[in-house]
């Protein structure tokens, strides 16, 4: 539900813009506010989960997200919608990392790859259902219903979670408000600055982006300095001495940086043909996104048997190869894109569970929640940076038509995925053969 909400809004964005009579530049903050909020409070939410109970904070996240969805559906202005999206982001910020931590804590290490593969497959439904469902709802009902559908799902999830999920705790340390404030400012500012650079900036706007970026970077540097001196840090720097932890996180940033750059442009490219709609584009993405549900559970099992290194590396290579082949076929018919889309989807389905297991397996069991939070920080930062790089490449190589810029962008995103191989190849695998 949390992942789908980031995707489903994209196909409803035009309807929202027309309804509120706003510009594209104003509309983007209804989209960015969600991701910026998640990034800003993610580690804070993880700290609360480690101290007060992962299931308890997970349920609170579900409740806040559901309330935020109601507020979004009732919005009568863009400012109201942006504030409601911030509320949604507060809930979503703990839903993803806490679900990973609860799952990893409850499953034996020999089966974690398979379990995380299923987790990735279900999360992949967001990519499948989001664009298509958003287009269908807008066409048949109104855009408000993309938020109303979260309400029954959220209520049911809270009831099932309370009944079936085990409670677990991590390392219980006092919460440092100063460190929390620093990381919130650093993450929100960096994601905002990266998001803002995707537009065409000049003069005062560019100056503001640079100022916010530098201040955020300074807050991040001061946060890490403080963490190095804390007896009970919220982001233990000792984790980064582990080869698998740092390699898995940087490979994750490359994996999702490449993917989000494609997500930003591919639906637009698919709507270039005459008569194409958002719903058509969502359906044409199925060879890419459908593999997440089909392949991810089997890929997770392969991780348990073969080890993280081989599966992650092969996944990054296949994703990169798929995007490079799409670049070759941009001037051909859609049928030429089906195989490259499937290759890219298989690659993402393989690398995702492998890198998750690598990062979570590199820390003690009591620190799984913290590791999950850091993993998701790298995923978000990688996605924001990947989108920024993709847009920069697009504008640099666009020569009067969309396709030329898209061609260069696909080449760039393919290389970003292959860059992740430099990190994944250095991983140390822990295979469990039966």
Image (cartoon, rainbow, N blue to C red):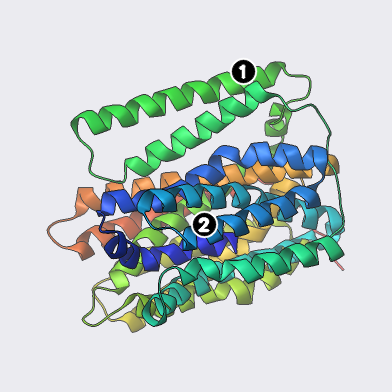
On screen, residue 44 versus residue 39, left or right, reads: right
In percent of the image, x 39 and y 58: which residue is there? 76
In percent of the image, x 78 and y 65: which residue is there? 159
The image shows residue 424 at horizontal and vertical percentages of: 60, 49
| Label 1 secondary element | helix
The outermost residue toward the left is: 400
On screen, residue 67 versus residue 382, left or right, reads: right
On screen, residue 54 versus residue 235, left or right, reads: right
Q: Residues within 10 Å of mark 1 (few under 14, many from 20)?
A: few
Q: Is residue 6 visible?
A: yes
Query: The N terminus appears in which quarter of the rendering?
Result: bottom right
Q: Which residue is mark 1?
A: 225
Q: Which residue is mark 2?
A: 71
The image shows residue 308 at horizontal and vertical percentages of: 70, 55
Label located before the other in sequence (1 or 2): 2
Which of these two is toward me, 304 or 118? 118
Query: The C terminus appears in which quarter of the rendering?
Result: bottom right
Q: Is residue 302 visible?
A: no
Residue 190's quadrant in the figure? top left
In percent of the image, x 24 and y 53: which residue is there? 23
In percent of the image, x 57 and y 25: which residue is there? 182
How far is disc 1 from disc 2 in space, using C-alphas? 39 Å
Which of these two is toward me, 355 or 142? 142
Q: How many marks?
A: 2
Residue 268's quadrant in the figure? bottom left
| Label 2 secondary element | helix
The image shows residue 299 at horizontal and vertical percentages of: 67, 68
The image shows residue 177 at horizontal and vertical percentages of: 67, 24
């Amino acid at each position: 539900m949390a992942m789908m909400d980031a995707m489903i809004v994209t196909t409803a964005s035009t309807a929202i813009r027309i309804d509120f009579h706003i510009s594209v530049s104003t509309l983007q903050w209804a989209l960015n506010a969600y991701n910026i909020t998640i990034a800003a409070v993610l580690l804070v939410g993880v700290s609360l989960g480690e101290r007060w109970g992962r299931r308890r904070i997970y349920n609170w996240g579900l409740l806040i997200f559901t309330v935020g969805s109601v507020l979004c559906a009732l919005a009568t202005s863009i400012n109201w919608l942006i504030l409601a999206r911030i509320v949604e982001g507060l809930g979503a910020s703990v839903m993803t990392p806490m679900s990973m931590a609860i799952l990893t804590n409850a499953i034996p290490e020999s089966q974690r790859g398979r379990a995380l593969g299923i987790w990735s497959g279900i999360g992949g439904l967001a990519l499948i259902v989001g664009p298509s469902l958003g287009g269908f709802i807008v066409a048949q009902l109104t855009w408000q219903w993309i938020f109303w559908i979260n309400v029954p799902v959220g209520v049911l999830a809270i009831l099932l979670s309370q009944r079936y999920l085990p409670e677990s705790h991590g390392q219980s340390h006092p919460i440092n408000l100063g460190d929390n404030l620093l990381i919130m400012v650093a993450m929100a500012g960096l994601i905002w600055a990266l998001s803002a650079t995707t537009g065409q900036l000049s003069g005062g706007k560019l100056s503001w982006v640079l100022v916010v970026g530098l201040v955020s970077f300074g807050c991040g540097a001061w946060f890490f300095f403080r963490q190095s001196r804390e007896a009970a840090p919220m982001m233990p720097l000792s984790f980064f001495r582990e080869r698998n932890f740092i390699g898995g996180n940087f490979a994750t940033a490359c994996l999702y940086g490449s993917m989000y750059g494609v997500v930003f442009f591919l639906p637009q490219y698919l709507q270039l043909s005459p008569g194409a709609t958002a719903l058509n584009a969502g359906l044409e993405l199925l060879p890419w996104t459908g593999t997440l549900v089909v392949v991810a559970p089997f890929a997770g099992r392969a991780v348990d048997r073969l080890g993280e290194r081989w599966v992650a590396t092969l996944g990054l290579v296949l994703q990169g190869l798929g995007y490079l082949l799409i670049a070759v076929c941009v001037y051909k018919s859609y049928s030429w894109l089906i195989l490259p889309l499937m290759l890219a989807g298989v690659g993402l389905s393989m690398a995702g569970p492998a890198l998750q297991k690598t990062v979570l397996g590199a820390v003690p069991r009591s620190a799984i929640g913290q590791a999950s939070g850091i993993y998701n920080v790298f995923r978000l930062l990688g996605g924001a940076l990947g989108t920024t790089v993709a847009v920069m490449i697009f504008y640099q190589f666009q020569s009067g038509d969309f396709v030329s810029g898209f061609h260069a962008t696909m080449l760039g995103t393919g290389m970003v995925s292959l860059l992740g191989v430099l990190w994944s190849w250095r991983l140390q695998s822990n295979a469990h053969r039966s």
